Amino acid sequence: AQSVTQPDIHITVSEGASLELRCNYSYGATPYLFWYVQSPGQGLQLLLKYFSGDTLVQGIKGFEAEFKRSQSSFNLRKPSVHWSDAAEYFCASNTGTASKLTFGTGTRLQVTL
Amino acid sequence: DGGITQSPKYLFRKEGQNVTLSCEQNLNHDAMYWYRQDPGQGLRLIYYSQIVNDFQKGDIAEGYSVSREKKESFPLTVTSAQKNPTAFYLCASSFQDGGYSYNEQFFGPGTRLTVL
């Protein structure tokens, strides 16, 4: 069965610093990969997705992610974090043959001013 | 505006009572999903439906039931058999292409259920 691992439960960065959130997946073939963001008490919003092609994908709010097959990773990055980026971030995968997303356990981002 | 609505936002229930959470979408999506979210556990799939009048169990279906009588609606009932129902419940929907669903899921704002 496929699984998604987000090794970092909680990350704190200073405003203006760069950010990288880690995500690893386990699946034999290339899955479809997603990053979502959730503000407290809210639903999830899609930041970006990877299906195929260019391994560096751009998303909303200045986020990007890079798919690395050799490392089974899909890490999320942002060059300069804003205080409004404080939220919980979820990585998810879908093999495409089933109508289900498998989520990681999430990384909570705290931004200090 | 197109989107997914969930109601109510907060719900309180006494032990032993069944309760139904509403989920409606006007995005014309074929597939709909229910997730449960607990702190530190991410989202876990309860049930999903790819077409009207059909649905499948997810990873944690015990103690829950659903129906899909209309394309726009996918209500979730939390029954008294669910041992620990206090959680945040999220509904989502997506397009479906020929049995595959590599399209992103769109999420509603969630319902927080508390058992008293």
Image (cartoon, grey):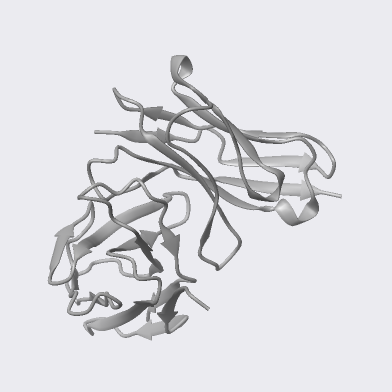
Q: Residue furthest left?
A: B53
Q: Residue at x 30, y 77 (%)?
A: B72
Query: To which quarter of the image does residue B105 belong?
Result: bottom left
Question: Looking at the image, is A41 positioned above or below residue A102?
Answer: below
Query: To which quarter of the image does residue B93 belong?
Result: bottom left
Query: To which quarter of the image does residue B56 belong?
Result: bottom left
Q: Position of residue A43 (x, y in %)?
A: 51, 65
How many labels sit on residues?
0
Q: Residue at x 44, y 61 (%)?
A: B106
Q: In the picture provided, is B68 more to the left or to the right than B10? A: left
Q: Residue at x 49, y 35 (%)?
A: A6
Closest to the observer, B57 or A47: A47
Q: Residue at x 19, y 60 (%)?
A: B61
Q: Residue furthest top?
A: A70
Q: Position of residue A95 (x, y in %)?
A: 30, 37
Q: In the picture provided, is B43 more to the left or to the right than A38? A: left
Q: In the picture provided, is B73 more to the left or to the right than A72? A: left
